[in-house]
Image (cartoon, grey):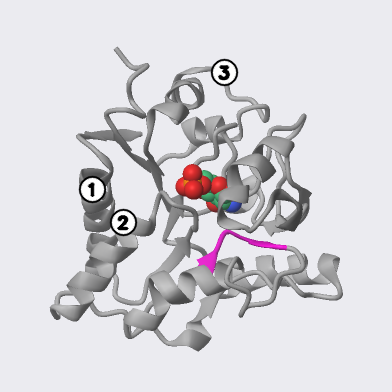
Amino acid sequence: MKIYKTKDYDAMSLKAATILASQITLKPDSVLGLATGSSPVGMYKKLVEWYQTGNLDFSQIMSVNLDEYRGLSPDNEQSYRYFMNTHLFDHVNIRKECTHVPDGLTENPDQACEDYEALIESLGGVDIQVLGMGHNGHIGFNEPCSEFAKITHCVDLAPSTIEANKRFFESEADVPRQAYSMGIGTIMKAKKILLIVSGADKAETLYRALTGPVTPEVPASILQFHKEVYVVADEAAMSCFK
Ligand code: GLP
């Protein structure tokens, strides 16, 4: 595991964007595993800038996203498909048909989850998986629980996640109670992982995740077992590390 400590959110975004841009440059037909949330927004902004200045080419890139709220359509402003379109896909030359986000409206969840796994396999697996981390240590929407979920599945969101994510909705009642998420097993199959964390409110959880016991009660702790993880975290998020 390689940990990069940066001064603040902007420096974190720049460093994370550099890692992703290197991947795209070295392997132009990479499969990127992408994440939503406030953590990667600055990184996507940088990637868009570099595309616009002619320094990055997404024409052969494929992508799979970590998760999606159950019940939200792609044109719902709170859906993760909408987030990806507005923060990245609409601004670069990625082929939209090569971007994949779990279908929040599927009528056959079990089949859709299996199909998502098969899709990732058919693309040759994820070259680099971007992750944010929830305050409770969740990655994707893998909430703290008694055992690690292996594959893409439907999750009941933890009350703390509903609370944390209500800022994006008109009211807490509007936050979906369920989501589809890659499993921990899906995430761990990625060849490389890029974890981005910012803010003092995640410092203790980040410390537990990277130095404490590996347990499904802190889902991000599983990353200690992955062979190629890059953690980019700002000083505030790293404040429990001496
Ligand atoms: C959300 C997403 C995660 C994200 C996390 C942290 O619930 N499902 O993929 O990493 O919470 O979000 P943020 O970066 O906004 O703190």
Separation of marks 1 and 3 at Cα, in angstroms: 31 Å
Q: Position of residue 231 (x, y in %)?
A: 35, 39
Is residue 3 magenta-colored?
no
Residue 42 has which mark? 2
**Kind of residue at disc 1:** Asp
Q: At which x and y percent is residue 90?
A: 40, 82
| Front residue of this view, candidates 150 and 96 | 96
Judged from the image, the secondary structure of the residue bearing numbered disc 2 is helix
Classify residue 4 as left or right of residue 126: left
- The residue range painted magenta reads 64-69
- Residues at badges 2 and 1 in contact (C-beta under 8 Å)? yes
Q: Is residue 139 above or below residue 71?
A: above
Disc marking residue 18 = none
SS assignment at label 3: loop
Q: Secondary structure at mark 1?
A: helix
Residue 141 visible here:
yes
Q: Measured along the vertical axis of the image, is residue 209 above or below residue 66?
A: above
